[in-house]
């Protein structure tokens, strides 16, 4: 338990609406899933850095909203006390095993498993995936022509699915990787829908798909083990990984980790790339400056790993895109025992909601926080708890280096050859905690040197960036 010399207060006095009747309690939970940004901004404006989002009854658990770098540090910096809520569900089933990967683990088990997985995600290992990233980007761009219309989001989704599937499984036949990726993607969509989990007839369908996915992942694991020589893929590294005492990852652990690596690495990267391209269509002068940077450093070639990190304007643009529109807008931790936070005593199992989105818009850290100003990064020095698109602390995104390289390679290659001009007004939506462009974003492909008018945003998106 955290200690403090301050007198701690009862949760009934937490800042928030004066009374939280059941209706407000239920409405807030609903609002968090339908309009989280509005809820977070509203509470931040009205009640400051720390408030009750739900009712706290007599020593029972509830949910608090804790905003800003200090709370981020206190909570994310103490993973022994503040646990990641388990995703695992429904007893001994394929669905449970598929949702039991790293994200659902806590304490020593999380530490040990993360240690075993880490070698697959060190900078050195990630640089060996560069050719796969370049190859699939090239393949996508070969299908693009100036004047052609594309649906931007499905296009990027397919690219990222191919990259993540091939780097995870590394099968001899890349179409098999893609099929497996499509199966996991379909399973993710089905398991993310509450009715599919809650209603028995729908759940039976989900269970059948989970069993099929588990069988296929197991077959790939067996195939890899039988091959003997490890390939250049994440699964090979995970199969080889062992602790000092020889402990290795079991098949069940591998299944959970593969599923979560795909889920955590796919949609997040898709949205980071989609948002960056959309922002560049909104700021044509910046896009032109980027095209110049790419031309002078790469001369039209795909970047090497070193070059991918030596493009300052591209680096600032990606950083600023993920500051303003972070793919993950909030995260939740749960007290593994009673704890003190913000001067209040809270019961075990109380939830703390932290927000990357709110932190990234604090005016005391970022001047003109609602404006897109990549150049701010030339002089900005922020702590890991002030800028955290990949989170921070012991549970920081294990794929951050992977995603950073992937985004730089895809954007450098794409922007050197084309520009993407969305055809209508672009809007946003939040699915779970993921901030994404709404719909497919139909777009026209143009030459990089063509001057176009700045893209219009919907009134909702204009409220986020102005
Ligand atoms: C732009 C892309 C990405 C973003 C913005 C992102 C963001 C995040 C964030 C915010 C967390 C922490 C979640 C929390 O604390 O609740 C996280 C965790 C995680 N991410 Fe990523 N991620 C990205 C790409 C990837 C990729 C490419 C992979 C793997 C291939 C990956 C795998 C994971 C895993 C396994 C965790 C859980 C780590 C743990 O609990 O120890 N992510 N990510």
Image (cartoon, grey):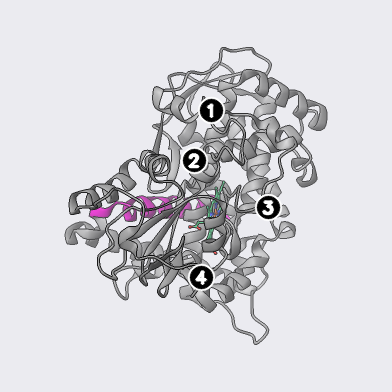
Of mark 2 and mark 4, the one earlier in the sequence is 2
Of mark 3 and mark 2, the one earlier in the sequence is 3
Q: Nearer the viewer, mark 1 or mark 2?
A: 1
How crowded pointer 3 is (Cα within 10 Å; few <14, some 14-19, many 20+) is rated as: many
Q: Name the residue: 77% across, 28% down.
A: 293
Please name the residue that numbered disc 4 is placed on: 254
The circle on residue 129 is 3
- How far separated are the C-alphas under marks 1 and 2? 15 Å
Magenta segment, prevailing SS (helix, strand or loop): helix
The circle on residue 278 is 1
Please name the residue that numbered disc 2 is placed on: 157
How crowded pointer 4 is (Cα within 10 Å; few <14, some 14-19, many 20+) is rated as: many
Of mark 1 and mark 3, the one earlier in the sequence is 3
Label pair 1/2, CB-CB below 8 angstroms:
no
Q: Is residue 158 visible?
A: no
Q: Which element type, helix, strand or loop, lies under badge 4?
A: helix
Of mark 1 and mark 4, the one earlier in the sequence is 4
Number of labels in the image equals: 4
Residue 169, image x and y in percent?
56, 59
Q: Toward which corner of the image does residue 209 lie, by quadrant?
A: bottom left
């Amino acid at each position: 338990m955290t200690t403090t010399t301050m007198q701690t207060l009862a949760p009934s006095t937490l800042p928030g609406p004066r009374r939280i009747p059941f209706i407000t309690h239920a409405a807030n939970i609903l609002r968090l899933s339908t309009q989280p940004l509005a809820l977070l901004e509203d509470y931040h404006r009205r009640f400051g850095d720390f408030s009750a989002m739900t009712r706290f009854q007599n020593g029972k658990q509830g949910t608090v909203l804790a905003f800003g770098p200090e709370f981020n540090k206190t909570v994310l910096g103490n993973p022994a006390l503040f646990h990641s809520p388990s995703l695992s569900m429904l007893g001994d089933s394929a669905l449970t095993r598929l949702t039991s990967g790293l994200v659902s683990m806590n304490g020593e088990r999380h530490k040990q498993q993360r240690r075993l997985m880490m070698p697959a995600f060190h900078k050195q290992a990630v640089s060996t995936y560069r050719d796969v990233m370049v190859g699939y980007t090239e393949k996508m761009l070969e299908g693009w022509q100036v004047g052609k219309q594309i649906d931007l989001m499905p296009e990027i989704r397919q690219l990222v699915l191919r990259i993540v599937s091939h780097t995870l499984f590394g099968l001899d036949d890349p179409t098999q990787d893609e099929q497996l990726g499509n199966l996991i993607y379909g399973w993710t969509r089905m398991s993310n829908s509450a009715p599919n989990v809650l209603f028995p007839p729908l759940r039976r369908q989900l269970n059948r798909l989970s069993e099929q996915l588990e069988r296929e992942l197991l077959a790939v694991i067996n195939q890899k083990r039988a091959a003997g020589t490890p390939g250049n893929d994440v699964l090979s590294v995970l199969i080889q990984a062992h602790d000092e005492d020889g402990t290795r990852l079991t098949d069940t652990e591998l299944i959970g980790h593969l599923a979560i690596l795909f889920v955590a690495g796919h949609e997040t990267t898709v949205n980071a790339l989609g948002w960056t391209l959309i922002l560049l269509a909104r700021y044509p002068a910046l896009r032109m400056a980027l095209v110049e940077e790419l031309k002078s450093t790469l001369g039209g070639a795909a970047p090497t790993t070193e070059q991918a990190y030596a493009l300052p304007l591209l680096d600032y643009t990606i950083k600023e895109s993920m500051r303003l529109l972070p793919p993950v807008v909030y995260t939740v931790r749960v007290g593994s025992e009673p704890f003190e936070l913000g001067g209040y005593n809270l019961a075990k199992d109380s939830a703390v909601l932290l927000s990357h989105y709110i932190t990234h818009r604090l005016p005391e850290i970022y001047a003109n926080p609602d404006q897109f100003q990549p150049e701010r990064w030339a002089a900005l020095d922020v702590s890991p708890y002030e800028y955290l698109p990949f989170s921070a602390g012991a549970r920081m995104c294990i794929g951050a280096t992977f995603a950073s390289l992937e985004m730089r390679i895809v954007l450098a290659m794409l922007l050197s050859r084309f520009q993407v001009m969305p055809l209508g007004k672009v809007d946003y939506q939040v699915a779970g905690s993921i901030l994404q462009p709404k719909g497919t974003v139909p777009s026209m492909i143009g030459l990089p040197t063509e001057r176009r008018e700045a893209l219009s945003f919907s009134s909702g998106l204009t409220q986020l960036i102005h």
